[in-house]
Amino acid sequence: MPSGVSLRWIGLILAIVLLDQGTKQLVVSLLEPGRPMVVLASDTLPSVDFILSYNKGISFSFLRFADDAQRWPLVALSLLACGLLGWWLSRVLTSQPIQAFGLALIIGGALGNMLDRVRIGSVIDFVHVSYKAWSFAVFNLADTAITLGALATLASTFLVPQGVGTESQEPPRHGR
């Protein structure tokens, strides 16, 4: 039986949005764009810096244009995606909490980034991971939630217990 969207998943979505927005506001108040703050520096491990960055595009700066043409289409796309994922979340079986967890993470992350686009026209990114000459894109907590949510949702397809998904079959008949 579908779980509906339980308060636990709504709470997780809200927690992701609030944590994402809170960390972004903290970073905006502490950092200047383009001036990194070293969090972890190492010759043997990946390094982590906080660097304030404004991304008008989507992940990894894809669709990043000089003007503001993509702002509202990306907001609309985020709303559409969240609506579809919310519908999917409402249909997840109670026996599949990993899938529900993953969908809630994706929705929370998408809403967090969408709020940035609505408020300021770009997404606030600030976490930069690098190792020697290798450098990863600058990202935020919402991006992390989306990535982990996608992994959890994908993993849930491989972790379906035996017999799940057979709810549409008729129950066993007794006494005939």
Image: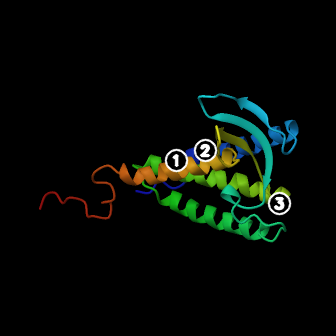
- Quickly name the residue at label 3: 121
Q: Which residue has dot 1 on it?
A: 101
Q: Is residue 137 visible?
A: yes
Q: What's the residue at 75%, 38% (across, down)?
A: 50
Type of amino acid under label 2: Leu
Q: Which structural element holds mark 3?
A: loop
Q: Looking at the picture, how far across and down is residue 31, in whole percent? A: 85, 38
State left or right for residue 78 relative to residue 101: right
- 68 relative to 155 in the view: left or right: right
Residue 12: numbered disc: 2
**Residue at far front of view:** 133
| Closer to us: 34 or 8 | 34
Q: Are marks 3 and 1 in contact (CB under 8 Å)?
A: no
* x and y percentages locating residue 111 in the rendered image: 69, 55
Q: Who's the residue at 85% across and 45% down the image?
A: 33
SS for tag 1?
A: helix
Locate residue 96, reporting x and y percent: 42, 50
Q: Residue at x 36, y 52 (%)?
A: 158
Report the mark closest to the observer, 3 or 1. Answer: 3
Task: Evaluate if marks 1 and 2 touch, with contact meaning CB atoms under 8 Å apart.
Answer: yes
Mark 3 or mark 1: which comes first in sequence? Answer: 1
* 73 shown above or below 118: below
User: Spatial distance from mark 2 to mark 3, Cα to Cα?
Assistant: 25 Å
Residue 14 visible in this rendered orientation of the protein: no
In the rendered view, tell whether residue 70 sits above or below residue 38. Answer: below
Label 2: how many Cα within 10 Å (few below 14, some 14–19, many 20+): some
Q: Amino acid at mark 3?
A: Gly
Q: Secondary structure at mark 2?
A: helix
* Residue 15 image offset from top left, x and y in percent: 66, 42
